[in-house]
């Protein structure tokens, strides 16, 4: 049974790796951020369009291993249309899941394909790969909250 699950999850991960969601660059970016995972060589750039506290659109460009790319793709799929508060909750749950910590019962969120990443907790070196997009996201949201202004704005 668990072998079957692993296979299913591998297919989900590989699908995101081959066709990353959020790959398309945005015309306008409210927050631009970059992240690196030196232990694996994964590099990531992220652009967010935020309006009234809602993530309206997201671009994730990740060059790296299958885990980092697919995690960034799942992030792009899941956070679009969500409020910043919801996104923070999702990031918290993803972090706990990857570290093998219990997830509080009172948190109800849509995980989408993110469940497929749970197996990563068995491979401690890959946890950083799976977390790269999430830490980049949270850092960029927090930066904006701290400054009470947009960290970066660009038009292409
Ligand atoms: Zn990696």
Image (cartoon, grey):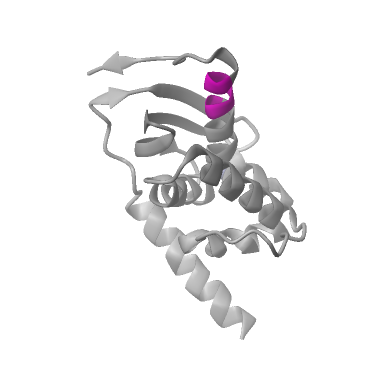
Q: Is residue 60 magenta?
A: no
Tally of marks: 0
Q: Is residue 142 magenta?
A: yes
The residue drawn where x is 60% and y is 47% is 89
Quadrant where the C terminus lies? top left
Residue 4's place in the image compared with 36, above or below, is below
The residue drawn where x is 55% and y is 41% is 85
Residue 30 is situated, as x and y percent measured from the top left of the image, at 37, 22
Magenta residue span: 140-145
Residue 111's place in the image compared with 94, above or below, is below
Residue 32 is situated, as x and y percent measured from the top left of the image, at 42, 22
**Secondary structure mostly taken by the magenta-highlighted segment of the chain:** helix
Residue 62's place in the image compared with 2, above or below, is above
Q: Nearer the viewer, residue 34 or 28?
A: 28
Query: Is residue 56 left or right of 13 when viewed as pictured?
Result: left
Residue at the outermost front position: 52
Residue 12 is situated, as x and y percent measured from the top left of the image, at 44, 65
Residue 98's place in the image compared with 137, above or below, is below
Q: Nearer the viewer, residue 152 or 123?
A: 152
Quadrant where the N terminus lies? bottom right
Residue at the outermost bottom position: 1
The residue drawn where x is 54% and y is 64% is 116
The residue drawn where x is 56% and y is 40% is 134
């Amino acid at each position: 049974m668990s072998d079957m699950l692993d296979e299913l999850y591998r297919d989900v991960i590989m699908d995101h790796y081959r066709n990353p969601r959020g790959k398309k660059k945005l015309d306008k970016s409210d927050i631009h951020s970059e992240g690196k995972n030196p232990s694996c060589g994964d590099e990531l750039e992220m652009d967010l369009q935020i309006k009234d506290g809602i993530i309206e659109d997201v671009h994730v460009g990740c060059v790296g291993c299958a885990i980092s790319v697919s995690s960034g793709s799942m992030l792009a799929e899941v956070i679009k249309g969500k409020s910043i508060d919801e996104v923070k909750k999702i990031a918290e749950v993803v972090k706990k899941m990857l570290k093998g910590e219990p997830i509080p019962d009172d948190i109800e969120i849509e995980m989408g394909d993110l469940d497929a990443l749970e197996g990563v907790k068995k491979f401690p070196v890959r946890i950083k790969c799976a977390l790269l997009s999430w830490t980049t996201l949270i850092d960029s949201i927090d930066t904006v909250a701290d400054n009470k202004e947009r960290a970066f704005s660009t038009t292409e």
